[in-house]
Image (cartoon, helix red, strand yellow):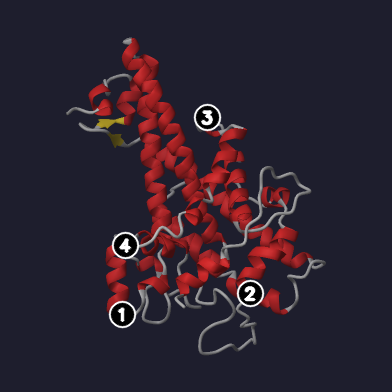
Amino acid sequence: MKRSAKRLMISAAAFALLAIPASQVIAWGASGHRVIGVIGMQTLPDTLPGFLRTPGAASDVGEYSREPDRWKGGGQPHDRERDTAHFIDMDDEGRVMDERGMLLAEMPRLKSEYDAALTRAGLDVDDAGYLHYAIIDAWQNLERDFAYWRVLNAAEARETDLAKREWYRADRLRREQLILRDIGQLSHYLGDASQPHHTTIHFNGWAGKTNPEGFTNSRRTHGTFEGAYAARTLNPVTVKSAMSPLNVEGFDVKTRTVSFLNTTLSTVIPFYRLEKAGAFRDADPRGAEFLNQRLSAGAEQLRDFTVAAWNASGTSSVGWPAVKVAEVEAGSVDPWMSMVGED
């Protein structure tokens, strides 16, 4: 069975999460993605538009965070192109798959170039995964969303023609729904990137030629951690309180993505050491701390990536003919034909 197919089976565990009070226990399947989406939205700063900072928006993003898992089973080429977006298998040195693979910092500009490089190295693209490109692509899409919203919002506020103003309003509302969906997609991939098993060749029990510390090689390792154990252990209050302060200074999406994935990779051996020590038993606080910290890492990255996309959108150009967001917001450019489209 392909490594990607195994991951789809492993990720199937899920429990419903309609609200997340402190006393509720939920699983890191569908529910884990919901928690990352909801808490990431709840912690957005007030510098972002108000429509993002409502309970409804947080709830919507929590649900949309499940979408990349719900896409599965559509057939080919849909599944081949999307299913391998959920992981990137690195060895203990941070190379994709093994010594033949590249470090993430060396990844090419385009995914097609990445696929070609893996093939030349004799590595299977399906086994390797491409989570890093999925995160970057989702962030770039969100930045486009925000840029269009800025233009529509500014134009609506200034437009004196009632018919044009109503079109701007309707298109802004459509864009707001797209933004929530696209934040949800970004949330899903950042959530995957916070889970140690989605960054390693040891994705379901220790793999490879050597096992010097005698770690488990049970094929239930991944599923048990995400499923039954997490269902008893996840604490949303702890997840939120463990988040680091906002950090978007000098944000570069590729650099941040590589750093985050490598940071998560560094938790793989600690996970297996904890598992060997019995920390993922109900009464042991070490396992609970590890679990909630990893979910917290996903939520804080969603917050940071979203804020960084908003900030970047202010210097963008959108539409055709292209208009500069800053000029539209300043009132020096009429964006009508660029937004409504010229046949």
- Badge 2 element: helix
- Badge 3 element: helix
Q: Position of residue 98 (x, y in %)?
A: 42, 80
The first of marks 2 and 1 along the sequence is 1
Point 64% across, 83% down: residue: 215
Q: Is residue 327 above or below residue 287?
A: above
Q: Three-letter amino acid code at disc 3? A: Phe
Residue under numbered circle 2: 221
The first of marks 1 and 3 along the sequence is 3
Point 31% across, 69% down: residue: 115
Give the distance between the C-alpha atoms of the residues marked 4 and 3, in whole angstroms.
33 Å
Q: For residue 121, which numbered disc appears in the image?
A: 1
The first of marks 2 and 3 along the sequence is 3
- Looking at the rendering, which quadrant does residue 269 occupy? bottom right
Of residues 127 and 116, the one drawn nearer to the viewer in this rendering = 127
Point 63% across, 75% down: residue: 220
Using residue 276 as the reference point, say whether residue 124 is left or right of it.
Answer: left
One can see residue 235 in this view: yes
Using residue 209 as the reference point, say whether residue 293 is left or right of it.
Answer: right
Of residues 299 and 234, the one drawn nearer to the viewer in this rendering = 234
Q: Three-letter amino acid code at disc 4? A: Lys
Q: Is residue 337 above or below residue 14?
A: above
Q: For residue 51, which numbered disc appears in the image?
A: 3
- Looking at the rendering, which quadrant does residue 43 occupy? top right
Q: Three-letter amino acid code at disc 1? A: Ala
Give the distance between the C-alpha atoms of the residues marked 4 and 1, in whole angstroms.
15 Å
Residue under numbered circle 4: 111
Using residue 24 as the reference point, say whether residue 264 is left or right of it.
Answer: left
Q: Position of residue 193 (x, y in %)?
A: 52, 60
